[in-house]
Image (cartoon, rainbow, N blue to C red):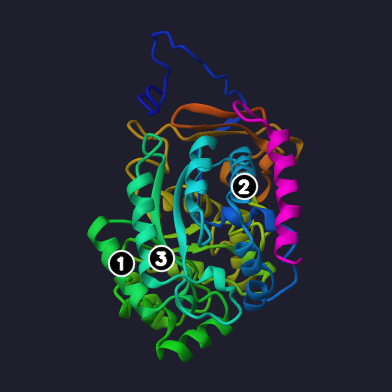
Amino acid sequence: MRDGRIVSVGDAPRKRHQTVIDATGMWLLPGLIQTHIHLCQTLFRGYADDLRLLDWLKTRVWPMEAAHTPASLRAATRAAGLELLQSGTTSILTMETVHDTGVVFEAAAEMGLRATIGKCLMDAETPGAPARLRESTRAALEESVALHRQFNGSANGRIRAAFAPRFAVSCTRELMEGVAELSAAGGSIVHSHASEQEDEVALVREITGLGNIEYFEAVGLASPRLNLAHCIWLDERDMVRLAEHDVKVTSCPGSNLKLGSGVAPVPALLDRGICVSLGSDGAACNNHLDMFSEMRLAAALQAMTLGPGRLTAGRVVAMATRHGARALGVEDELGSIEVGKRADLILIDSQGAHLGAAPDPYSAIVYAARPSDVRLTMVDGEILIKDGQPQHLDAAEIAATARDEARRLAGRAGL
């Protein structure tokens, strides 16, 4: 690696190197890529358990998002960033809350993460949502544009900006169409939720008169730049629309199980050529940000519903790497170990007793590996985690600050 990129793969060149890493007994992988997270919800962990989606939003998540301050958002981002890096995730697509998203951009950059970040957009009168989470259409769009101008491409290109309308229920048609125009003009990613639960699908139809995916198409958002989280409750017409417009889908099996949402039809989507990647969702509904659990659940759930082997371990690893890069529109830069690509890499220790003889690395990684098996994480060729420990961050301070800010946040939210 040189200047943050891979310059050679295979036999080591004879010339001397500044740093040599002994990877004996390790598996070298591209950094894992999660395409649906809410960094702002990291401090909500344990405050929003055992609820269905709409109740979860109204009674816990929205009140806590409304109670965020810049200090609590920074603490949440740092805690999440450390957890992600220690468990091998190097790139994320995240939807934040309505206010103070600039703090998240700054903190993610400081952590060394590669992050595409969207300010949450909510301009519709949404039942159960605090008034502080509702903005005018103009204010929501103008602040998103300002964040793009300030942060997109910063930190040597590690930090990018996205547009993030929360979901069809919380956004007016005017806002959705405005986002579609801005995305088309600038090529920006749009990140939203869709078809997560049957109640939500019914509510979207009641409000718009259209199915969920049909509505995204009607407002001009269905395009290769759109990344939709969940997409569980789809019919055949929905999948045809997703495929026709090359819309990207993120499956979040851990969150979907905990909220009782259902099992996404991942193999059916993949069979139609739809790009499906993985995300842990937020710590409010998972409750961790561990990609190894998501990979295992992704494969096991399809085995349960469709039969073993319907979603193989190798295919799941591709979802966590190559598909994530494609979903972010950076497949030429990330997602595989190739000359010219960014040196976002992880080493996984293959010698643990729980991994056995491991005749198939893909099987071992998906079904047996743990976050604690990640020995090294680097982004742009810079080692951020070594032997499980951050190299430039104070883990104890990050955890202590997060605990303090979580208590204050819960108090402000009345929980």
Q: Is residue 409 magenta?
A: yes
Quadrant in which residue 164 is drawn: bottom left
Q: Which residues are magenta?
A: 389-415
Mark 3 lies on residue: 140
Task: Point out residue 387 in the picture as x, y percentages from the top left corner.
Answer: 66, 27
Q: Amino acid at mark 3?
A: Ala
Going from N to C along the chain, the mark reached first, 2 or 3, is 2
**Closer mark to the observer between disc 1 and disc 2:** 2
Is residue 300 at least partly visible in the picture? no
Q: Nearer the viewer, residue 125 or 282?
A: 125
Mark 2 lies on residue: 71
Disc 1 and disc 2: Cα gap in Å? 36 Å
Q: What main secondary structure does the magenta stretch of the protein show?
A: helix
| Quarter of the rendering occupied by the N terminus | top left
Secondary structure under tag 1 reads: loop
Number of the label disc, if any, that sits on residue 223: 1
Q: Is residue 205 magenta?
A: no
**Closer mark to the observer between disc 3 and disc 1:** 3
Disc 2 and disc 3: Cα gap in Å? 22 Å
Going from N to C along the chain, the mark reached first, 1 or 2, is 2
- Residue 44 relative to residue 110: left or right: right
Is residue 61 at least partly visible in the picture? yes
Task: Point out residue 147 in the picture as x, y percentages from the top left corner.
Answer: 39, 52
Quadrant in which residue 302 is drawn: bottom right
